[in-house]
Amino acid sequence: MELKTLDIFCEIIDNYGDIGVVYRVAKELKKVFFNSKIRVFLNRLDEFKKINSSVIDSGIQTIDSIEYITFDYLRENSKTLSTSQVIIEAFGCKIPEEYMAIAYNHSDLLINLEYLSAEDWIEDFHLQSSPLGQGKLKKFFFMPGFTEKSGGIIADSNYLERAKKVAMNKKEYRDKYLADIENIDNKIVGTLFSYEKNFIPLIEDLQKFDKEVVLLALGEKTQESLRKILKNFSIEHFRNSLKYGKIEIRFLEFLNQEEYEELINLVDFNFVRGEDSFIRAVLTGKPYMWHIYCQEEFAHLDKIEGFLDKYRKVIQEFADDEFLDNMEKFFKDYNFRKENNLELGKESYLYFFENLAKIERYNTIFRDFLIQKCNLINKLKIFIEKY
C-alpha cells in the first residue's frame, strides 16, 4: 500500500537539537515519500525560527512542501485535521490526547524515534513492539545508533550534498566565513560548541602547539564559559576577536542549520555538543570532540564508552593501538565531570592537535562506514514500506 500521510511529533524542551533532528528527518522523508503528505507538529516555534528564517508565528504553515502545525492549533482543530497512516513520535514526546484519541483506531503505525545511543542494548530493543492496549494502532521503537543492527544515524542527502559543495568550492566558503583571518593557510581554524566547560587546559595547551589556532566560539554556553575563564589571562583585543599568544578567539553570532553545516565542513576541526551537532561533525570526516550532556552517576560516560567501542571496531584494522588509546583517553577525560559547570578537567589537548591529519584519515573511514551501512533514513523507509 502506498504511504499517503505521515505525521511527526516533536516536543522542544530547552535546546535546538530536537527540532534540528526532526527538521532534518522531515525534509529527507519528503524526498523519499515525495507523493505523501507530511506534517510536523511542534509544541513551540521559537527554536525552529532560529534555525530556519522562513518560519513565521503561525499555528499552521507550509515550508518546502511540509506542513508545520503547533500543538495549540492541533488542539483547537483536532477533529478537522484528522490523523495519518504513520506517526513518528520523536524522542518519546507526549502526543496531544486530542490526536491520540482518534489515532488509536484510524492510524496504522506509531514509531517512537529515540535519542541516539551507542550502547549495546539498543540493538536488542530496536524495532521491538510496545502494546498500546486499544485500537488497531501498533507501536514500535526505532533506536538510532552506530551499528548495522541499530537504527543508524541521519546521513541525509541534503547534508551530504552541502558537504560536497563546500569541499569543491573551498575558496568561496572561506570568503563567506573566514575572509578576515590573516595568513589563514598557516593557521588551524576550528569551531568550539559546548555545554558549560572550563577551557583553561585548552588555552594553556595551545600555547605549546607549534601553529597559531583560531577558535570560532558558538552558542551562549560556550561563549559564557570562555568569558569567565579568560579573566585569568592577559587578553589582547584584536579587531573583532580576542587574542592570547598563539590563540585567536572569535565569538560568532547564531548560525542557522545550513550555515553551521557549511562552516563545520570548511574548518580543520570541530568541538561539538549534544546529538545533532555531533552527528554533523562525524559526517564531516574531520577531527572532532564530543561534549555529551552530563548525567547523574556518570551515566554519560557509558555512552562515551559505547561510541568509542563502535569507533574502534570500525577503524582498528587501520589504526594502531597507541592512536586508539590516546583518542579514547581524550574523549573520556574531556567528558569526565559530575555536572555541567566550570569544574576543572584533567584533559590534555596536545595529542589531538598534533595528530589532526591522522585523526581525519581514520574519521573519514568511520564516516564512510556509517553512510554506507548505517543510514537511518534508508532503514526507516524500509521499515515503513515493509510494515
Image (cartoon, helix red, strand yellow):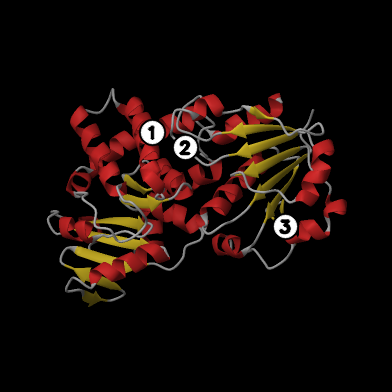
In percent of the image, x 32 and y 67: which residue is there? 250
Rendered location of residue 283, percent (x, y): 42, 41
Residue where numbered disc 1 is placed: 306
| Mark seen at residue 117 | 2
| Mark seen at residue 33 | none
Q: Nearer the viewer, residue 302 or 251?
A: 302
Amino acid found under the numbered disc labelled 1 = Gly
Contact, mark 2 vs mark 1 (Cβ under 8 Å): yes
Give the structural element (helix, strand or loop) at label 2: loop
Amino acid found under the numbered disc labelled 3 = Phe
Q: Quadrant of the C terminus?
A: top right
Q: Nearer the viewer, residue 232 or 270?
A: 232
- Crowd class of label 3 (few under 14; some 14 to 19; many from 20; radius 10 Å): many
Query: Quarter of the image holding residue 12?
Result: bottom right
> Does 116 sit left or right of 3 as displayed?
left
- Crowd class of label 1 (few under 14; some 14 to 19; many from 20; radius 10 Å): some
**Sequence order check, earlier mark of 2 and 1:** 2
**Sequence order check, earlier mark of 2 and 3:** 3
Rendered location of residue 310, percent (x, y): 38, 30
- Establish if 291 lies above or below 372: below
**Sequence order check, earlier mark of 3 and 1:** 3
Q: Distance from label 2 to label 3 (Cα)?
A: 28 Å
Whether residue 180 is visible: no
